[in-house]
Image: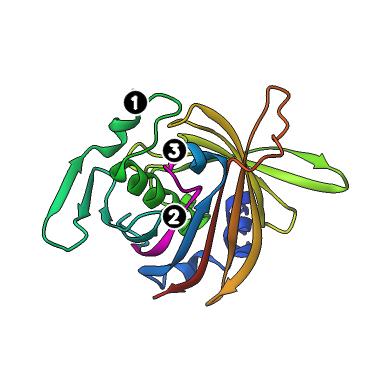
Amino acid sequence: MGEATPTRTLIDDIMDAHGGQHLFAMYRRAQGRFRIEGDLWSTRGGPSASVGGLFELGLLDQTVRLHCTDPRPIESNFTPKVLAIDSADGGYVETQYNPRSSFAEMSVDRPWDDFQLAYICSYSIWNVVTQPFLFASAGFEVAELQPHQVGEETIRRAQISYPPHIPGHAPKIMCHVGIDGMMRWQEFRFDLLSASVTSVLKDFVQIQGIRFASRRTMYRTTELEKPDPSVFAEISIDKLVFY
């Protein structure tokens, strides 16, 4: 008797549809340009309704270098436990340890300071660039749930549980996937803001063989589990290069 063929899982289908884990594993770093805007930034980002600039990141070690150009210049270096911000003239560096803890007692309308702005931008960009391949990393748990129908399309669902050492918007996200294996949207409880959110993946492009959603639009989810039509936050990435 021949060897049994391994049973394919939803996460296998997702990886293959987005270019394949074997291809993504060839790269160690990425760089590009980003912009984040929407209602969230109108209250938390200060005077400007958006933030943008350039980034460089490590695909394996969760390090992010940001060069924010607006609403104000910020140069920052991110790791999950330490965040450093350079002065505008490069003369000194301020460091904050355990930066996520600074969100714990914030009022709902207080703008973020530079550390908080850099922190949330950094981990958000890193997650966007590394998903879905991130989900195959050690410590992640993926549970396939029953599919459901949305119009004429069958949507498969995966509940993704993050390990404690990887910052994300939530400890668990629900990923909705088309029959073709492509991620369509995600649902989660944005824990830093205590908001239920639906994040829709848009404008897929192919970059060096990797299929990538260049825009993610987040909507608040109402008590009726329907997205609020106003854009809560939107992150766009272009000029992305893996190397």
Please tell me which of labels 2 and 3 falls first in the chain.
Answer: 3
Q: Is residue 96 above or below residue 216?
A: above
Question: Residues in magenta?
Answer: 45-57
Query: Where does label 3 land, which residue?
Result: 44
Residue 76 location in percent, x, y? 27, 56
Task: Specify whether residue 54 is painted magenta.
Answer: yes
Q: Amino acid at mark 1?
A: Ala
Image quadrant assignment for residue 145: top right
The residue sitting at 50% across, 52% down in the picture is 36
Residue 164 location in percent, x, y? 35, 36
Query: Where does label 2 land, which residue?
Result: 125
Q: CA distance from mark 2 to mark 1?
A: 21 Å
Query: Where does label 1 land, which residue?
Result: 104
The quarter of the picture where the C terminus appears is: bottom left
Q: Secondary structure at mark 1?
A: loop
Q: 206 or 134: which is nearer to us?
A: 206
Q: Residues within 10 Å of mark 3 (few under 14, many from 20)?
A: some
Residue 235 location in percent, x, y? 53, 54
Foreground label between 2 and 3: 3
Instruction: Looking at this view, name the residue that lies furthest to the left.
Output: 91
